[in-house]
Amino acid sequence: MAFLWSVLLNAVLPLAVAYLIISFLVDPANIDTSELQTNSFLMSTHSIFRNIFDPDILAVSVGASAILLLTSMAGAIAVAVPAGILYAWSGRRALKAVAWSISTVAASLPTFFWAVALELVMILLWFKLGIRVVAIAGFGIDDHLVLPAIALGVRPAAYIFRLTATAVDEIRHTDYVRTAVAKGLPSGLLLVRHVLPNAAPNIIAATVLGARGALSSLAIVDLVYVWGGAGLVFVQALGSRRLVLATELALTFAVASVLLALAADLARARVRVAA
Amino acid sequence: MLLGLIGVLALLAMGVFGSLVAPFDPNAGTSMLARDFPNGMQFRVPPTLPDDLHWFGTDALGRDQLSRILAGAKLTLAVVLTAALVRLGIGLTLGLVSGWYGGPFVRAMTIVASGITAIPQLLLAMMLVLVTRDFGGYGFIASLALVGWPEIAEFVRAESQRVKAQPYIEAARAIGAPGRRIVTGHLVRALAPQLLSVAALETGSVLVLLAELGLVGVFLAGATFLLGDVGISGTLKDRAPEWGQMLGTIQFFAMTQQLGTLIPALFVVLAAASFALLADGLRAASDPFDPQRLSPGTQNIVAKVLAGALCLSAVGFVTVNVPTSALTMEQGRELSAKTANSAWPGSVFVAGVARFTSFSEGVPRPYRLTYYYRRARGAEILRIGFQNADRLSVEVRQYESEDEIDFTTLQPLPAGLVSYDIPLVKAEAAGGAVFRQAQRSSVVRAIVTWPSDRDTPVYAVTYGGTSRGELTFKQVCCVNAKSGEAIGTLRLQ
């Protein structure tokens, strides 16, 4: 019952509010999209095999975005969680300072800068030196995925790294871990049995919140790399006055975001129960 | 902290004095850049890469990027700081109210707030900008301010609930201090150091939002598109120098102009980073357990320095104005007379046209100045135009029937006429401004002519829209070109 109540308060009602806001803003009587329409570059940018007038564009673009988001989050977790654990476990101060500074830089630079800078570096490598590392733009579940996933994943990775490091560091200094060390438990076993299970809720919450942040940068990465995901299609739908499609896409974003927030709340609730 | 403080102060100084030190007019562009090189003349088509004349290169319309960055700091910072302050104001008020009073109001606010946070900031801001376009710059600022406040409200709510439980608040309540006084006297004072840090953080995030909007092609004044009037002039039809707009072209020229396109992005990132550093430093300074903490006295000094710099730069933003090197109607006329006389000696001036568009609302500068000269013997007409009222971008061609001016009834105009500013102001006052708001994508043009049925030359200021590529004029306001008196208004519906 309490769970249902919290779902109503944290998911259903906010979604209703979001729907009201979106439908007010996207109302043809209110919105003037002519300036997007005249932006010929924006409107003619789309992945080769699809365009905005395809009947299944909603599913396809949301799917493309989901692939990108999942890949970048998986990459972020794969890099950031081990790095965070190592950071908390390591005793080398200089190395720790360097890692922390890198994460600060990564977290404080905006996603659009990562996207543009990565793209320009790749273009320079290709045009000036003739080295083609990975595909620069376009959709494809191959090397096309690399650059957008990195650009989208840098900030969540930094975020996850920092929160993992703090959580593991905190648990490392608790009494029960000290007792286990004193009893002679090998550090690998200690990590798997005692530290990780207790740090997990924090790490999950960080991941979910990081994904929520990435969700709002999706449109930029979409545009820069011509990924053809929901963000770009949303802008083009506004520009070509397909306002129903735009509403649906914005609502999809809202639903995804609310679900992620709910997941973060659940993960944190576990922390509270455990404590 | 120090680095962030220096960066922010430098940014504010750049906003105030940037347009003074800019080496070129930020709005003056050319469709072709001519440069003298040792081995002869060379022409290059903008955008160009950085060289010793244009240190940061030029943009798609051939405008100097260094000048645009310097001069654009003012508009960018003014918009960003205002939006951040409004955001902070909303967040602080709602957060305090809900943190102090609680109850059903809090629940309602939380639901609305989480509804707003559910829509990604960029998409919401974009929709808001498109909806509030009729309100000009204020609408843009409001759009930046109306997103992102729920996070501040949530932070303030949590903090004020924490402070509310402190013994000294309880003591204040016990002696019967009214709630409003506790909130303004104790609660706000306890939150002040953190609020300062949040303000810096928000300014950075508003700046990033502005840049992202620019990248998508939505910025303060105008839109992105290809021009087709006199060949391809570029991709941007907008004059207000602003950093978000500078990013709008980044995608067009990424393949050929890698370095040039990255420069505005670098400036945005540097600015955002200095705000973030300042925020981090302020947080650490007010945290009693942080090794980088500062004494309350020093904190006070820092806060005062920041507030003072903000006030001074606000004054500076308003007072320091640099006249642009745009041609006035008269200068354009002199210049075009020279050109006409060198082509057709003894030719007679028949009409001058200044065109404005609603896209240039932010900047009072014509979109094109055109002058017509009749050959001394014969009926041919020479048209001399200045794109963007810029003396460098001259286009000369023989008359083709583009405008609806009846040249056969025109008489040669005398010298010593009033500038188009006065007729334009009169026309705006006589309902033109209202019309321009109602008609999106409207075109305004002021024509100085001498119809054969009048004793004196007149300015005819016409308001109209473009529909299917054709100009449809809706309102005409006539002003005496010698005295500046309004003659009459005509509404054509």
Image (cartoon, rainbow, N blue to C red):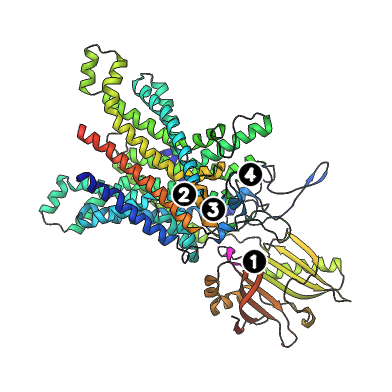
Provide the residue designation for mark 1: B366
User: What is the secondary structure assignment of the residue under circle 4?
Assistant: loop
Distance from Cα at disc 2 to Cα at disc 4: 24 Å
**Secondary structure beneath disc 1?**
loop
Q: Residue B130 location in percent, x, y? A: 49, 60
Please name the amino acid that badge 3 sits on.
Gln
Disc 4 crowd rating (10 Å Cα; few below 14, some 14-19, many 20+) is many
What residue did someone put label 4 on? B56
Asked whether, in this view, residue A147 is left or right of residue A209, the answer is right
Of pointers 4 and 1, the one earlier in the residue sequence? 4
Residue at image coords 64%, 67%: B468
- In which quadrant of the rendered image does the N terminus of chain B lie? top left
Q: Position of residue B446 (x, y in %)?
A: 65, 74
Residue furthest to the left: B174
| Figure check: A226 above or below A240 | above
- Name the residue that disc number 3 marks: A236
User: Residue A53 placed where, x, y %?
Assistant: 56, 53
Nearer the N terminus, badge 1 or badge 2? Answer: 2
